[in-house]
Amino acid sequence: MDFSPAYIGMCENAVFIQQIWNVAYGDFYCDKSAVFATRDVSASISLVDDKVLIDVMNQGFKRSKAVWLPRQDQLQELLNITEPLDVIQMLSEFMGAVDDDTRRRWTSMEQVLLCAYALRTYKKTWTGADWK
């Protein structure tokens, strides 16, 4: 799972992905208030557990301070590609549609799949700083 500052930034700026997040057990998120308080991104990563779900039900969970960090399996589900051969085919097609500079920026499958989802669904690409 990618917890890098780069992936957190991609997810935070991906309003389209944050808007579809249905908080579920086992989801990872970055608590933006913890980043602000500690200046340590790694200390801000949290996992949705029973306590968080209770807070969600009681409206005590502050979504505006949380950045969902989709896992690889969640991104594959959004892309509707769960079979290994389908993943390989989609990646082959996607990699042919982007330039070398773009490919060099990716350091995880989560980053690749988030970019593939953004391009396929919203026609957006990651510039390294924002979605265009």
Image (tube, helix red, strand yellow):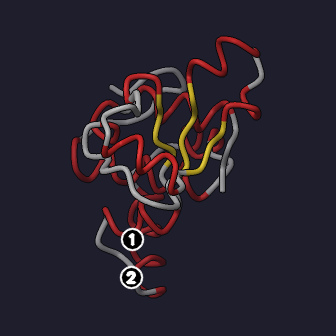
* Residue 7 found in image quarter: top right
- Point 50% across, 56% down: residue: 50
- Point 42% across, 51% down: residue: 53
CB contact under 8 Å: marks 2 and 1: yes
- Point 57% across, 34% down: residue: 30
The kind of residue on which mark 1 rests is Met
For residue 23, side relative to residue 27 (left or right): left
Quadrant where the N terminus is found in the figure: bottom right
Tag 2 residue:
86
Query: In x, y percent, where is residue 112?
Result: 52, 53
In what element is the residue under mark 1?
Answer: helix
> Mark 2 to mark 1: distance in Å?
6 Å
In what element is the residue under mark 2?
Answer: helix
Instruction: Note whether 81 is above or below 131 in the view shown.
Output: below
Tag 1 residue:
90
Pick the residue in front: 115 or 32: 32
